[in-house]
Image (spheres, rainbow, N blue to C red):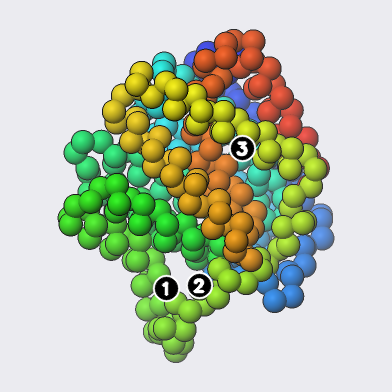
């Protein structure tokens, strides 16, 4: 197997992804005998999160096996889009392996199924968004991207910030009436469906919308201190440091990247500049918030690895791989 991640062929990338999928499933099966994590008093529980927790509690073995398709879908959906749009100075399959090791490191905890659902929705949202940023926008890609963004707060309360900021950012970058209507309709549709169903079952239409806002303004149902142990802190810190270096490389080399790819870099960098401060200021800052930031960051980190050479790429890949496995088994 090629250790230099930037030289990965599709076969090596898939091999890495399936190896990490096995690690994740083993961790999920090992969690079957673990005690359920207590929900923090006063913690906000998103509507779909409550349902997912009930499914996991009622069908733990089935939920453990469900991690495989959710993981593969999330990794392949976002990495395939990143590979195809040509974000780097040369083509590489590195995003597949890097997304695989990052997702395993960040979802291996008591919240594995809810976090994998977040990863799948976020992968669909980002993949569709960056595929719609070309000169001719395909309406269905933009619309489905916004639907995925709009569905995120139904799984985790803190992600309401993303479902508000990302559509606004897309509107500012596109600036056409037609695309503004598409963006707003897609982003608001999941919330409207949730509120309508709540009203149909005897609840309040406005109260359902208020619940999503309250979830964003209350602490998460699982305290962040239970999630951020030392190996995961090191992994996240290294990931964000690499992303910062990637941004500096992009600024110095953007003229060698295509115009379409530059628009993708712009929206990814701006989204981080908006989302990270919003998450830090919100009391609902959660594991899902960290996962969302990481999934945006990983799209950019192959650029410095490409520029620093084979030895650096191999060393970085090995460090991240080992850190991911250590993080996964240290839940």
Cα separation, mark 2 vs mark 3, equals 29 Å
158 on left or right of 168: right
Which of the 4 image quadrants contains residue 16?
top right
Cα separation, mark 1 vs mark 3, equals 34 Å
Which of the numbered marks, if any, corresponds to residue 194? 1
Q: Count residues near mark 1 (Cα–Cα under 10 Å), then give few for <14, some for 14-19, many for 20+.
A: some
Cα separation, mark 2 vs mark 1, equals 10 Å
State the SS at label 2: helix
Q: Dots 2 and 1: beta carbons under 8 Å?
A: yes
> What residue does disc 3 label?
240
- Placement of 324 over or under 165, stated as above or below: above
> What residue does disc 2 label?
212
Q: Count residues near mark 3 (Cα–Cα under 10 Å), then give few for <14, some for 14-19, many for 20+.
A: some
Which of the numbered marks, if any, corresponds to residue 315? none
Could you say which is closer to the camera, residue 10 or residue 58? 10
Identify the residue at horizontal 29%, vertical 57% (top origin).
Answer: 183
State the SS at label 3: helix
- Placement of 49 over or under 207, stated as above or below: above
Q: Earlier in the sequence, mark 2 or mark 3?
A: 2
State the SS at label 1: helix
Residue 263 appears at what percent x and percent y?
Answer: 33, 36
Q: Earlier in the sequence, mark 2 or mark 1?
A: 1
317 on left or right of 41: left
Residue 270 visible in image? yes
Question: Mark 2, mark 3: which one is toward the viewer?
Answer: 3
Residue 112 appears at what percent x and percent y?
Answer: 65, 51
């Amino acid at each position: 197997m090629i250790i230099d991640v930037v030289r990965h062929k599709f076969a090596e990338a898939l091999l890495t992804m399936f190896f990490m999928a096995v690690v994740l499933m083993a961790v999920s099966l090992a969690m079957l005998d673990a005690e359920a994590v207590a929900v923090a008093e006063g913690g906000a529980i998103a509507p779909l999160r409550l349902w997912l927790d009930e499914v996991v509690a009622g069908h733990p073995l089935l939920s453990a096996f469900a991690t495989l398709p959710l993981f593969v879908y999330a990794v392949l959906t976002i990495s395939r889009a990143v590979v195809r749009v040509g974000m780097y100075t040369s083509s590489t399959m590195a995003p597949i392996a890097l997304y695989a090791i990052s997702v395993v490191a960040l979802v291996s905890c008591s919240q594995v199924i809810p976090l994998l659902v977040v990863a799948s929705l976020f992968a669909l949202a980002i993949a569709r968004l960056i595929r719609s940023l070309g000169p001719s926008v395909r309406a269905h890609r933009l619309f489905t991207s916004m639907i995925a963004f709009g569905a995120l707060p139904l799984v985790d309360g803190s992600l309401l910030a993303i479902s508000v900021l990302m559509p606004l950012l897309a509107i500012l970058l596109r600036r056409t009436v037609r695309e503004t209507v598409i963006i707003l309709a897609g982003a608001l549709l999941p919330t409207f469906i949730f509120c309508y169903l709540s009203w149909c079952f005897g609840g309040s239409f406005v109260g359902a919308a208020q619940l999503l806002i309250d979830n964003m303004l209350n602490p998460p149902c699982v305290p962040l201190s239970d999630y951020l142990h030392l190996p995961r802190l090191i992994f996240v810190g290294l990931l964000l440091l690499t992303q910062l270096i990637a941004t500096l490389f992009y600024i110095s080399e953007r003229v060698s990247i295509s115009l379409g790819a530059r628009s993708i870099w712009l929206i990814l960098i701006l989204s981080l500049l908006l989302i990270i401060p919003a998450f830090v200021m919100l009391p609902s800052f959660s594991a899902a918030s960290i996962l969302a930031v990481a999934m945006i960051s990983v799209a950019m980190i192959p650029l410095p690895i490409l520029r620093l050479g084979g030895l650096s790429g191999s060393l970085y890949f090995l460090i991240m791989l080992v850190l991911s496995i250590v993080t996964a088994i240290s839940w």
